[in-house]
Image (tube, grey):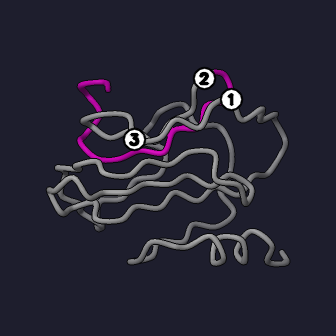
């Protein structure tokens, strides 16, 4: 990762760069491949983590795009302490778009819960 980016975990979804990943300051966690995103389209993106601060090799991360899980990993060690008060969306990484909703929870969502969020009427 870029040395000027603060330590942490980032969801990266570029329309021009593949593969798409969830990355941490230590390593890539999930590779989700080419999403085929086009301009002027809305997408539902969920990133979930379990045991992110345990400092043991028991971490799990998943990415869900439009109700489908294209990337996940289990058994990784994440050695970054989270500071929820310092969450930043965008990090100045040339994001051009809009967020309709941001939901931050203190638990890892399951497939049924993510599906319900994705299928919820707007």
Please report the residue visible at 41 percent of the width from the left and 77 percent of the height from the top: 107
| Badge 2 vs badge 1, beta-carbon distance below 8 Å | yes
On the image, the x and y values in percent for residue 46 come to 58, 59
On the image, the x and y values in percent for residue 38 come to 81, 33
- Dot 1 and dot 3 residues touching (CB under 8 Å): no
Mark 2 or mark 1: which comes first in sequence?
Answer: 2
Q: Which residue is mark 2?
A: 18
- Residue bearing the label numbered 1: 34
Quarter of the figure with the N terminus: top left
Image spot of residue 72 (x, y percent): 50, 49
User: Residue 87's image quarter?
Assistant: bottom left
Q: Specify whether 34 is left or right of 53.
A: right
Distance from the alpha carbon under mark 2 to that under mark 1: 6 Å
> Which residues fall within the magenta stretch?
1-16
Q: Is residue 105 above or below residue 99?
A: below
**Label 2 neighbour load within 10 Å: few <14, some 14-19, many 20+:** some
- In terms of sequence position, does the residue under pointer 3 or pointer 2 come before the other? 2
Query: Is residue 15 within the magenta segment?
Result: yes
Q: Earlier in the sequence, mark 1 or mark 3?
A: 3
Q: Residue 29 shows which numbered tag?
A: 3
What residue sits 77% from the left and 35% below the top? 37
Magenta span: helix, strand or loop, mainly?
Answer: loop
- Circle 2 sits in a helix, a strand or a loop, which is it? loop
Residue at disc 3, secondary structure? strand
């Amino acid at each position: 990762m870029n040395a000027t980016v603060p330590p942490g975990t980032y969801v990266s979804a570029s329309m021009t760069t593949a593969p798409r990943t969830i990355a941490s300051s230590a390593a890539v966690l999930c590779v989700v491949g080419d999403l085929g995103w086009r301009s002027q389209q809305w997408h539902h993106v969920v990133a979930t983590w379990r045991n992110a601060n345990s400092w043991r090799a028991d971490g799990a991360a998943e990415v869900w795009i439009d109700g489908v899980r294209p990337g996940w990993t289990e058994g990784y060690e994440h050695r970054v302490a989270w500071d929820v008060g310092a969450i930043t969306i965008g990090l100045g990484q040339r994001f051009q778009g809009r967020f309709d909703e941001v939901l931050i929870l203190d638990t890892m969502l399951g497939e049924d819960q993510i599906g319900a969020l994705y299928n919820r009427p707007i």
